[in-house]
Image (cartoon, rainbow, N blue to C red):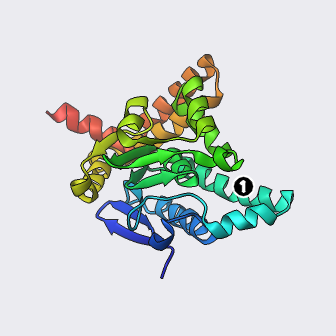
Amino acid sequence: MPELLIEDRESVRLLTLNRPEKRNALNDELITALKDALREADGDDRLRAIVITGAGKDFCSGADLSALQKIATASYEENFEDARSLAELFLLIRKVRGPVIAAVHGRALAGGCGLATACDLVIATRSARFGYPEVKIGFVPAMVAAILRRNLGEKKSFELLTQGFEFSAVEANAIGLVNAVFDDEAFDVAAIDYASRYVKVSGSAVAMTKRLLYDVDSLNFDDAITLGVETNARARMTDDCKEGIARFLEK
């Protein structure tokens, strides 16, 4: 049975973590499969959005037992390479052109919560639960800290990363970690409908906006505005923009 299921719903690519018996816990094979699938989707110009979800009752429970056993006995160099592999996944999500949406049901904990947080957008069922419980076993939610700190304020990030408690989808929505909450019963349809919003807008404009949004993180204000000017000028030269202006002027 494949670790990752891949299905197209018209212009939306659905990636389903397929280890339901392990609560879709991350292992080397699944992380590699996700990276390969993201790269493949990025090369398909027909696609407008990517949705990551989980089979069974949960989105993703983080690392599985075998991965934790491996961590406990590995050398620093081995642990470094293992952590870098997950970090590459988080970075890749930001580098692919189209929006990557986490569709969370059940629990998204530890690395699973990190995976959801790393996505461009997060939607969830009303009953979904989130949490970074790594500190309870002496672990550090390290790579996701860079992303969480960009999503939230310093004090809220500190609380979530160092106290290890679970919180609801409604709470996550209130603090800005979740974009939208849907009823459990209609979630499968709602997730695709939400992703399909990107069919109605320019793919090139979304891709350029995504790149700009993340690139300004490392810039001072003046340089960020300058990058905005350059991006604005490039956007004006695209076919989407020229065709959009022509349609507007015809009205």
Above-or-below relation of 22 to 210? below
Q: Residue at x 44, y 63 (%)?
A: 44
> Residue 171's x, y, as percent?
39, 35
**Residue found at the far left of this picture:** 251
Which of 39/181 is in front? 181
Q: Which image quadrant is residue 158 in?
A: top right
Which of 65/59 is in front? 65
Above-or-below relation of 198 to 145? below
**Residue found at the far top of this picture:** 222
Q: Is residue 222 left or right of residue 167?
A: right
> Residue 49's x, y, as percent?
38, 54
Residue 18 showing in the rendered view: no
Q: Is residue 160 left or right of residue 102?
A: right
Q: Which image quadrant is residue 53 in?
A: bottom left
Amino acid tagged 1: Arg
Above-or-below relation of 169 to 115? above
Residue where numbered disc 1 is placed: 84
Q: Quadrant of the C terminus?
A: top left
Q: Residue at x 81, y 65 (%)?
A: 73
- How packed is label 1: few (under 14 Cα within 10 Å), some, or many (20 or more)? few
Q: Is residue 85 left or right of residue 5?
A: right
Q: How many marks?
A: 1
Residue 237 showing in the rendered view: yes
Q: Residue at x 61, y 72 (%)?
A: 29
> Residue 127's x, y, as percent?
33, 49
Which of 227/51 is in front? 51
Secondary structure of the residue carrying tag 1 is helix
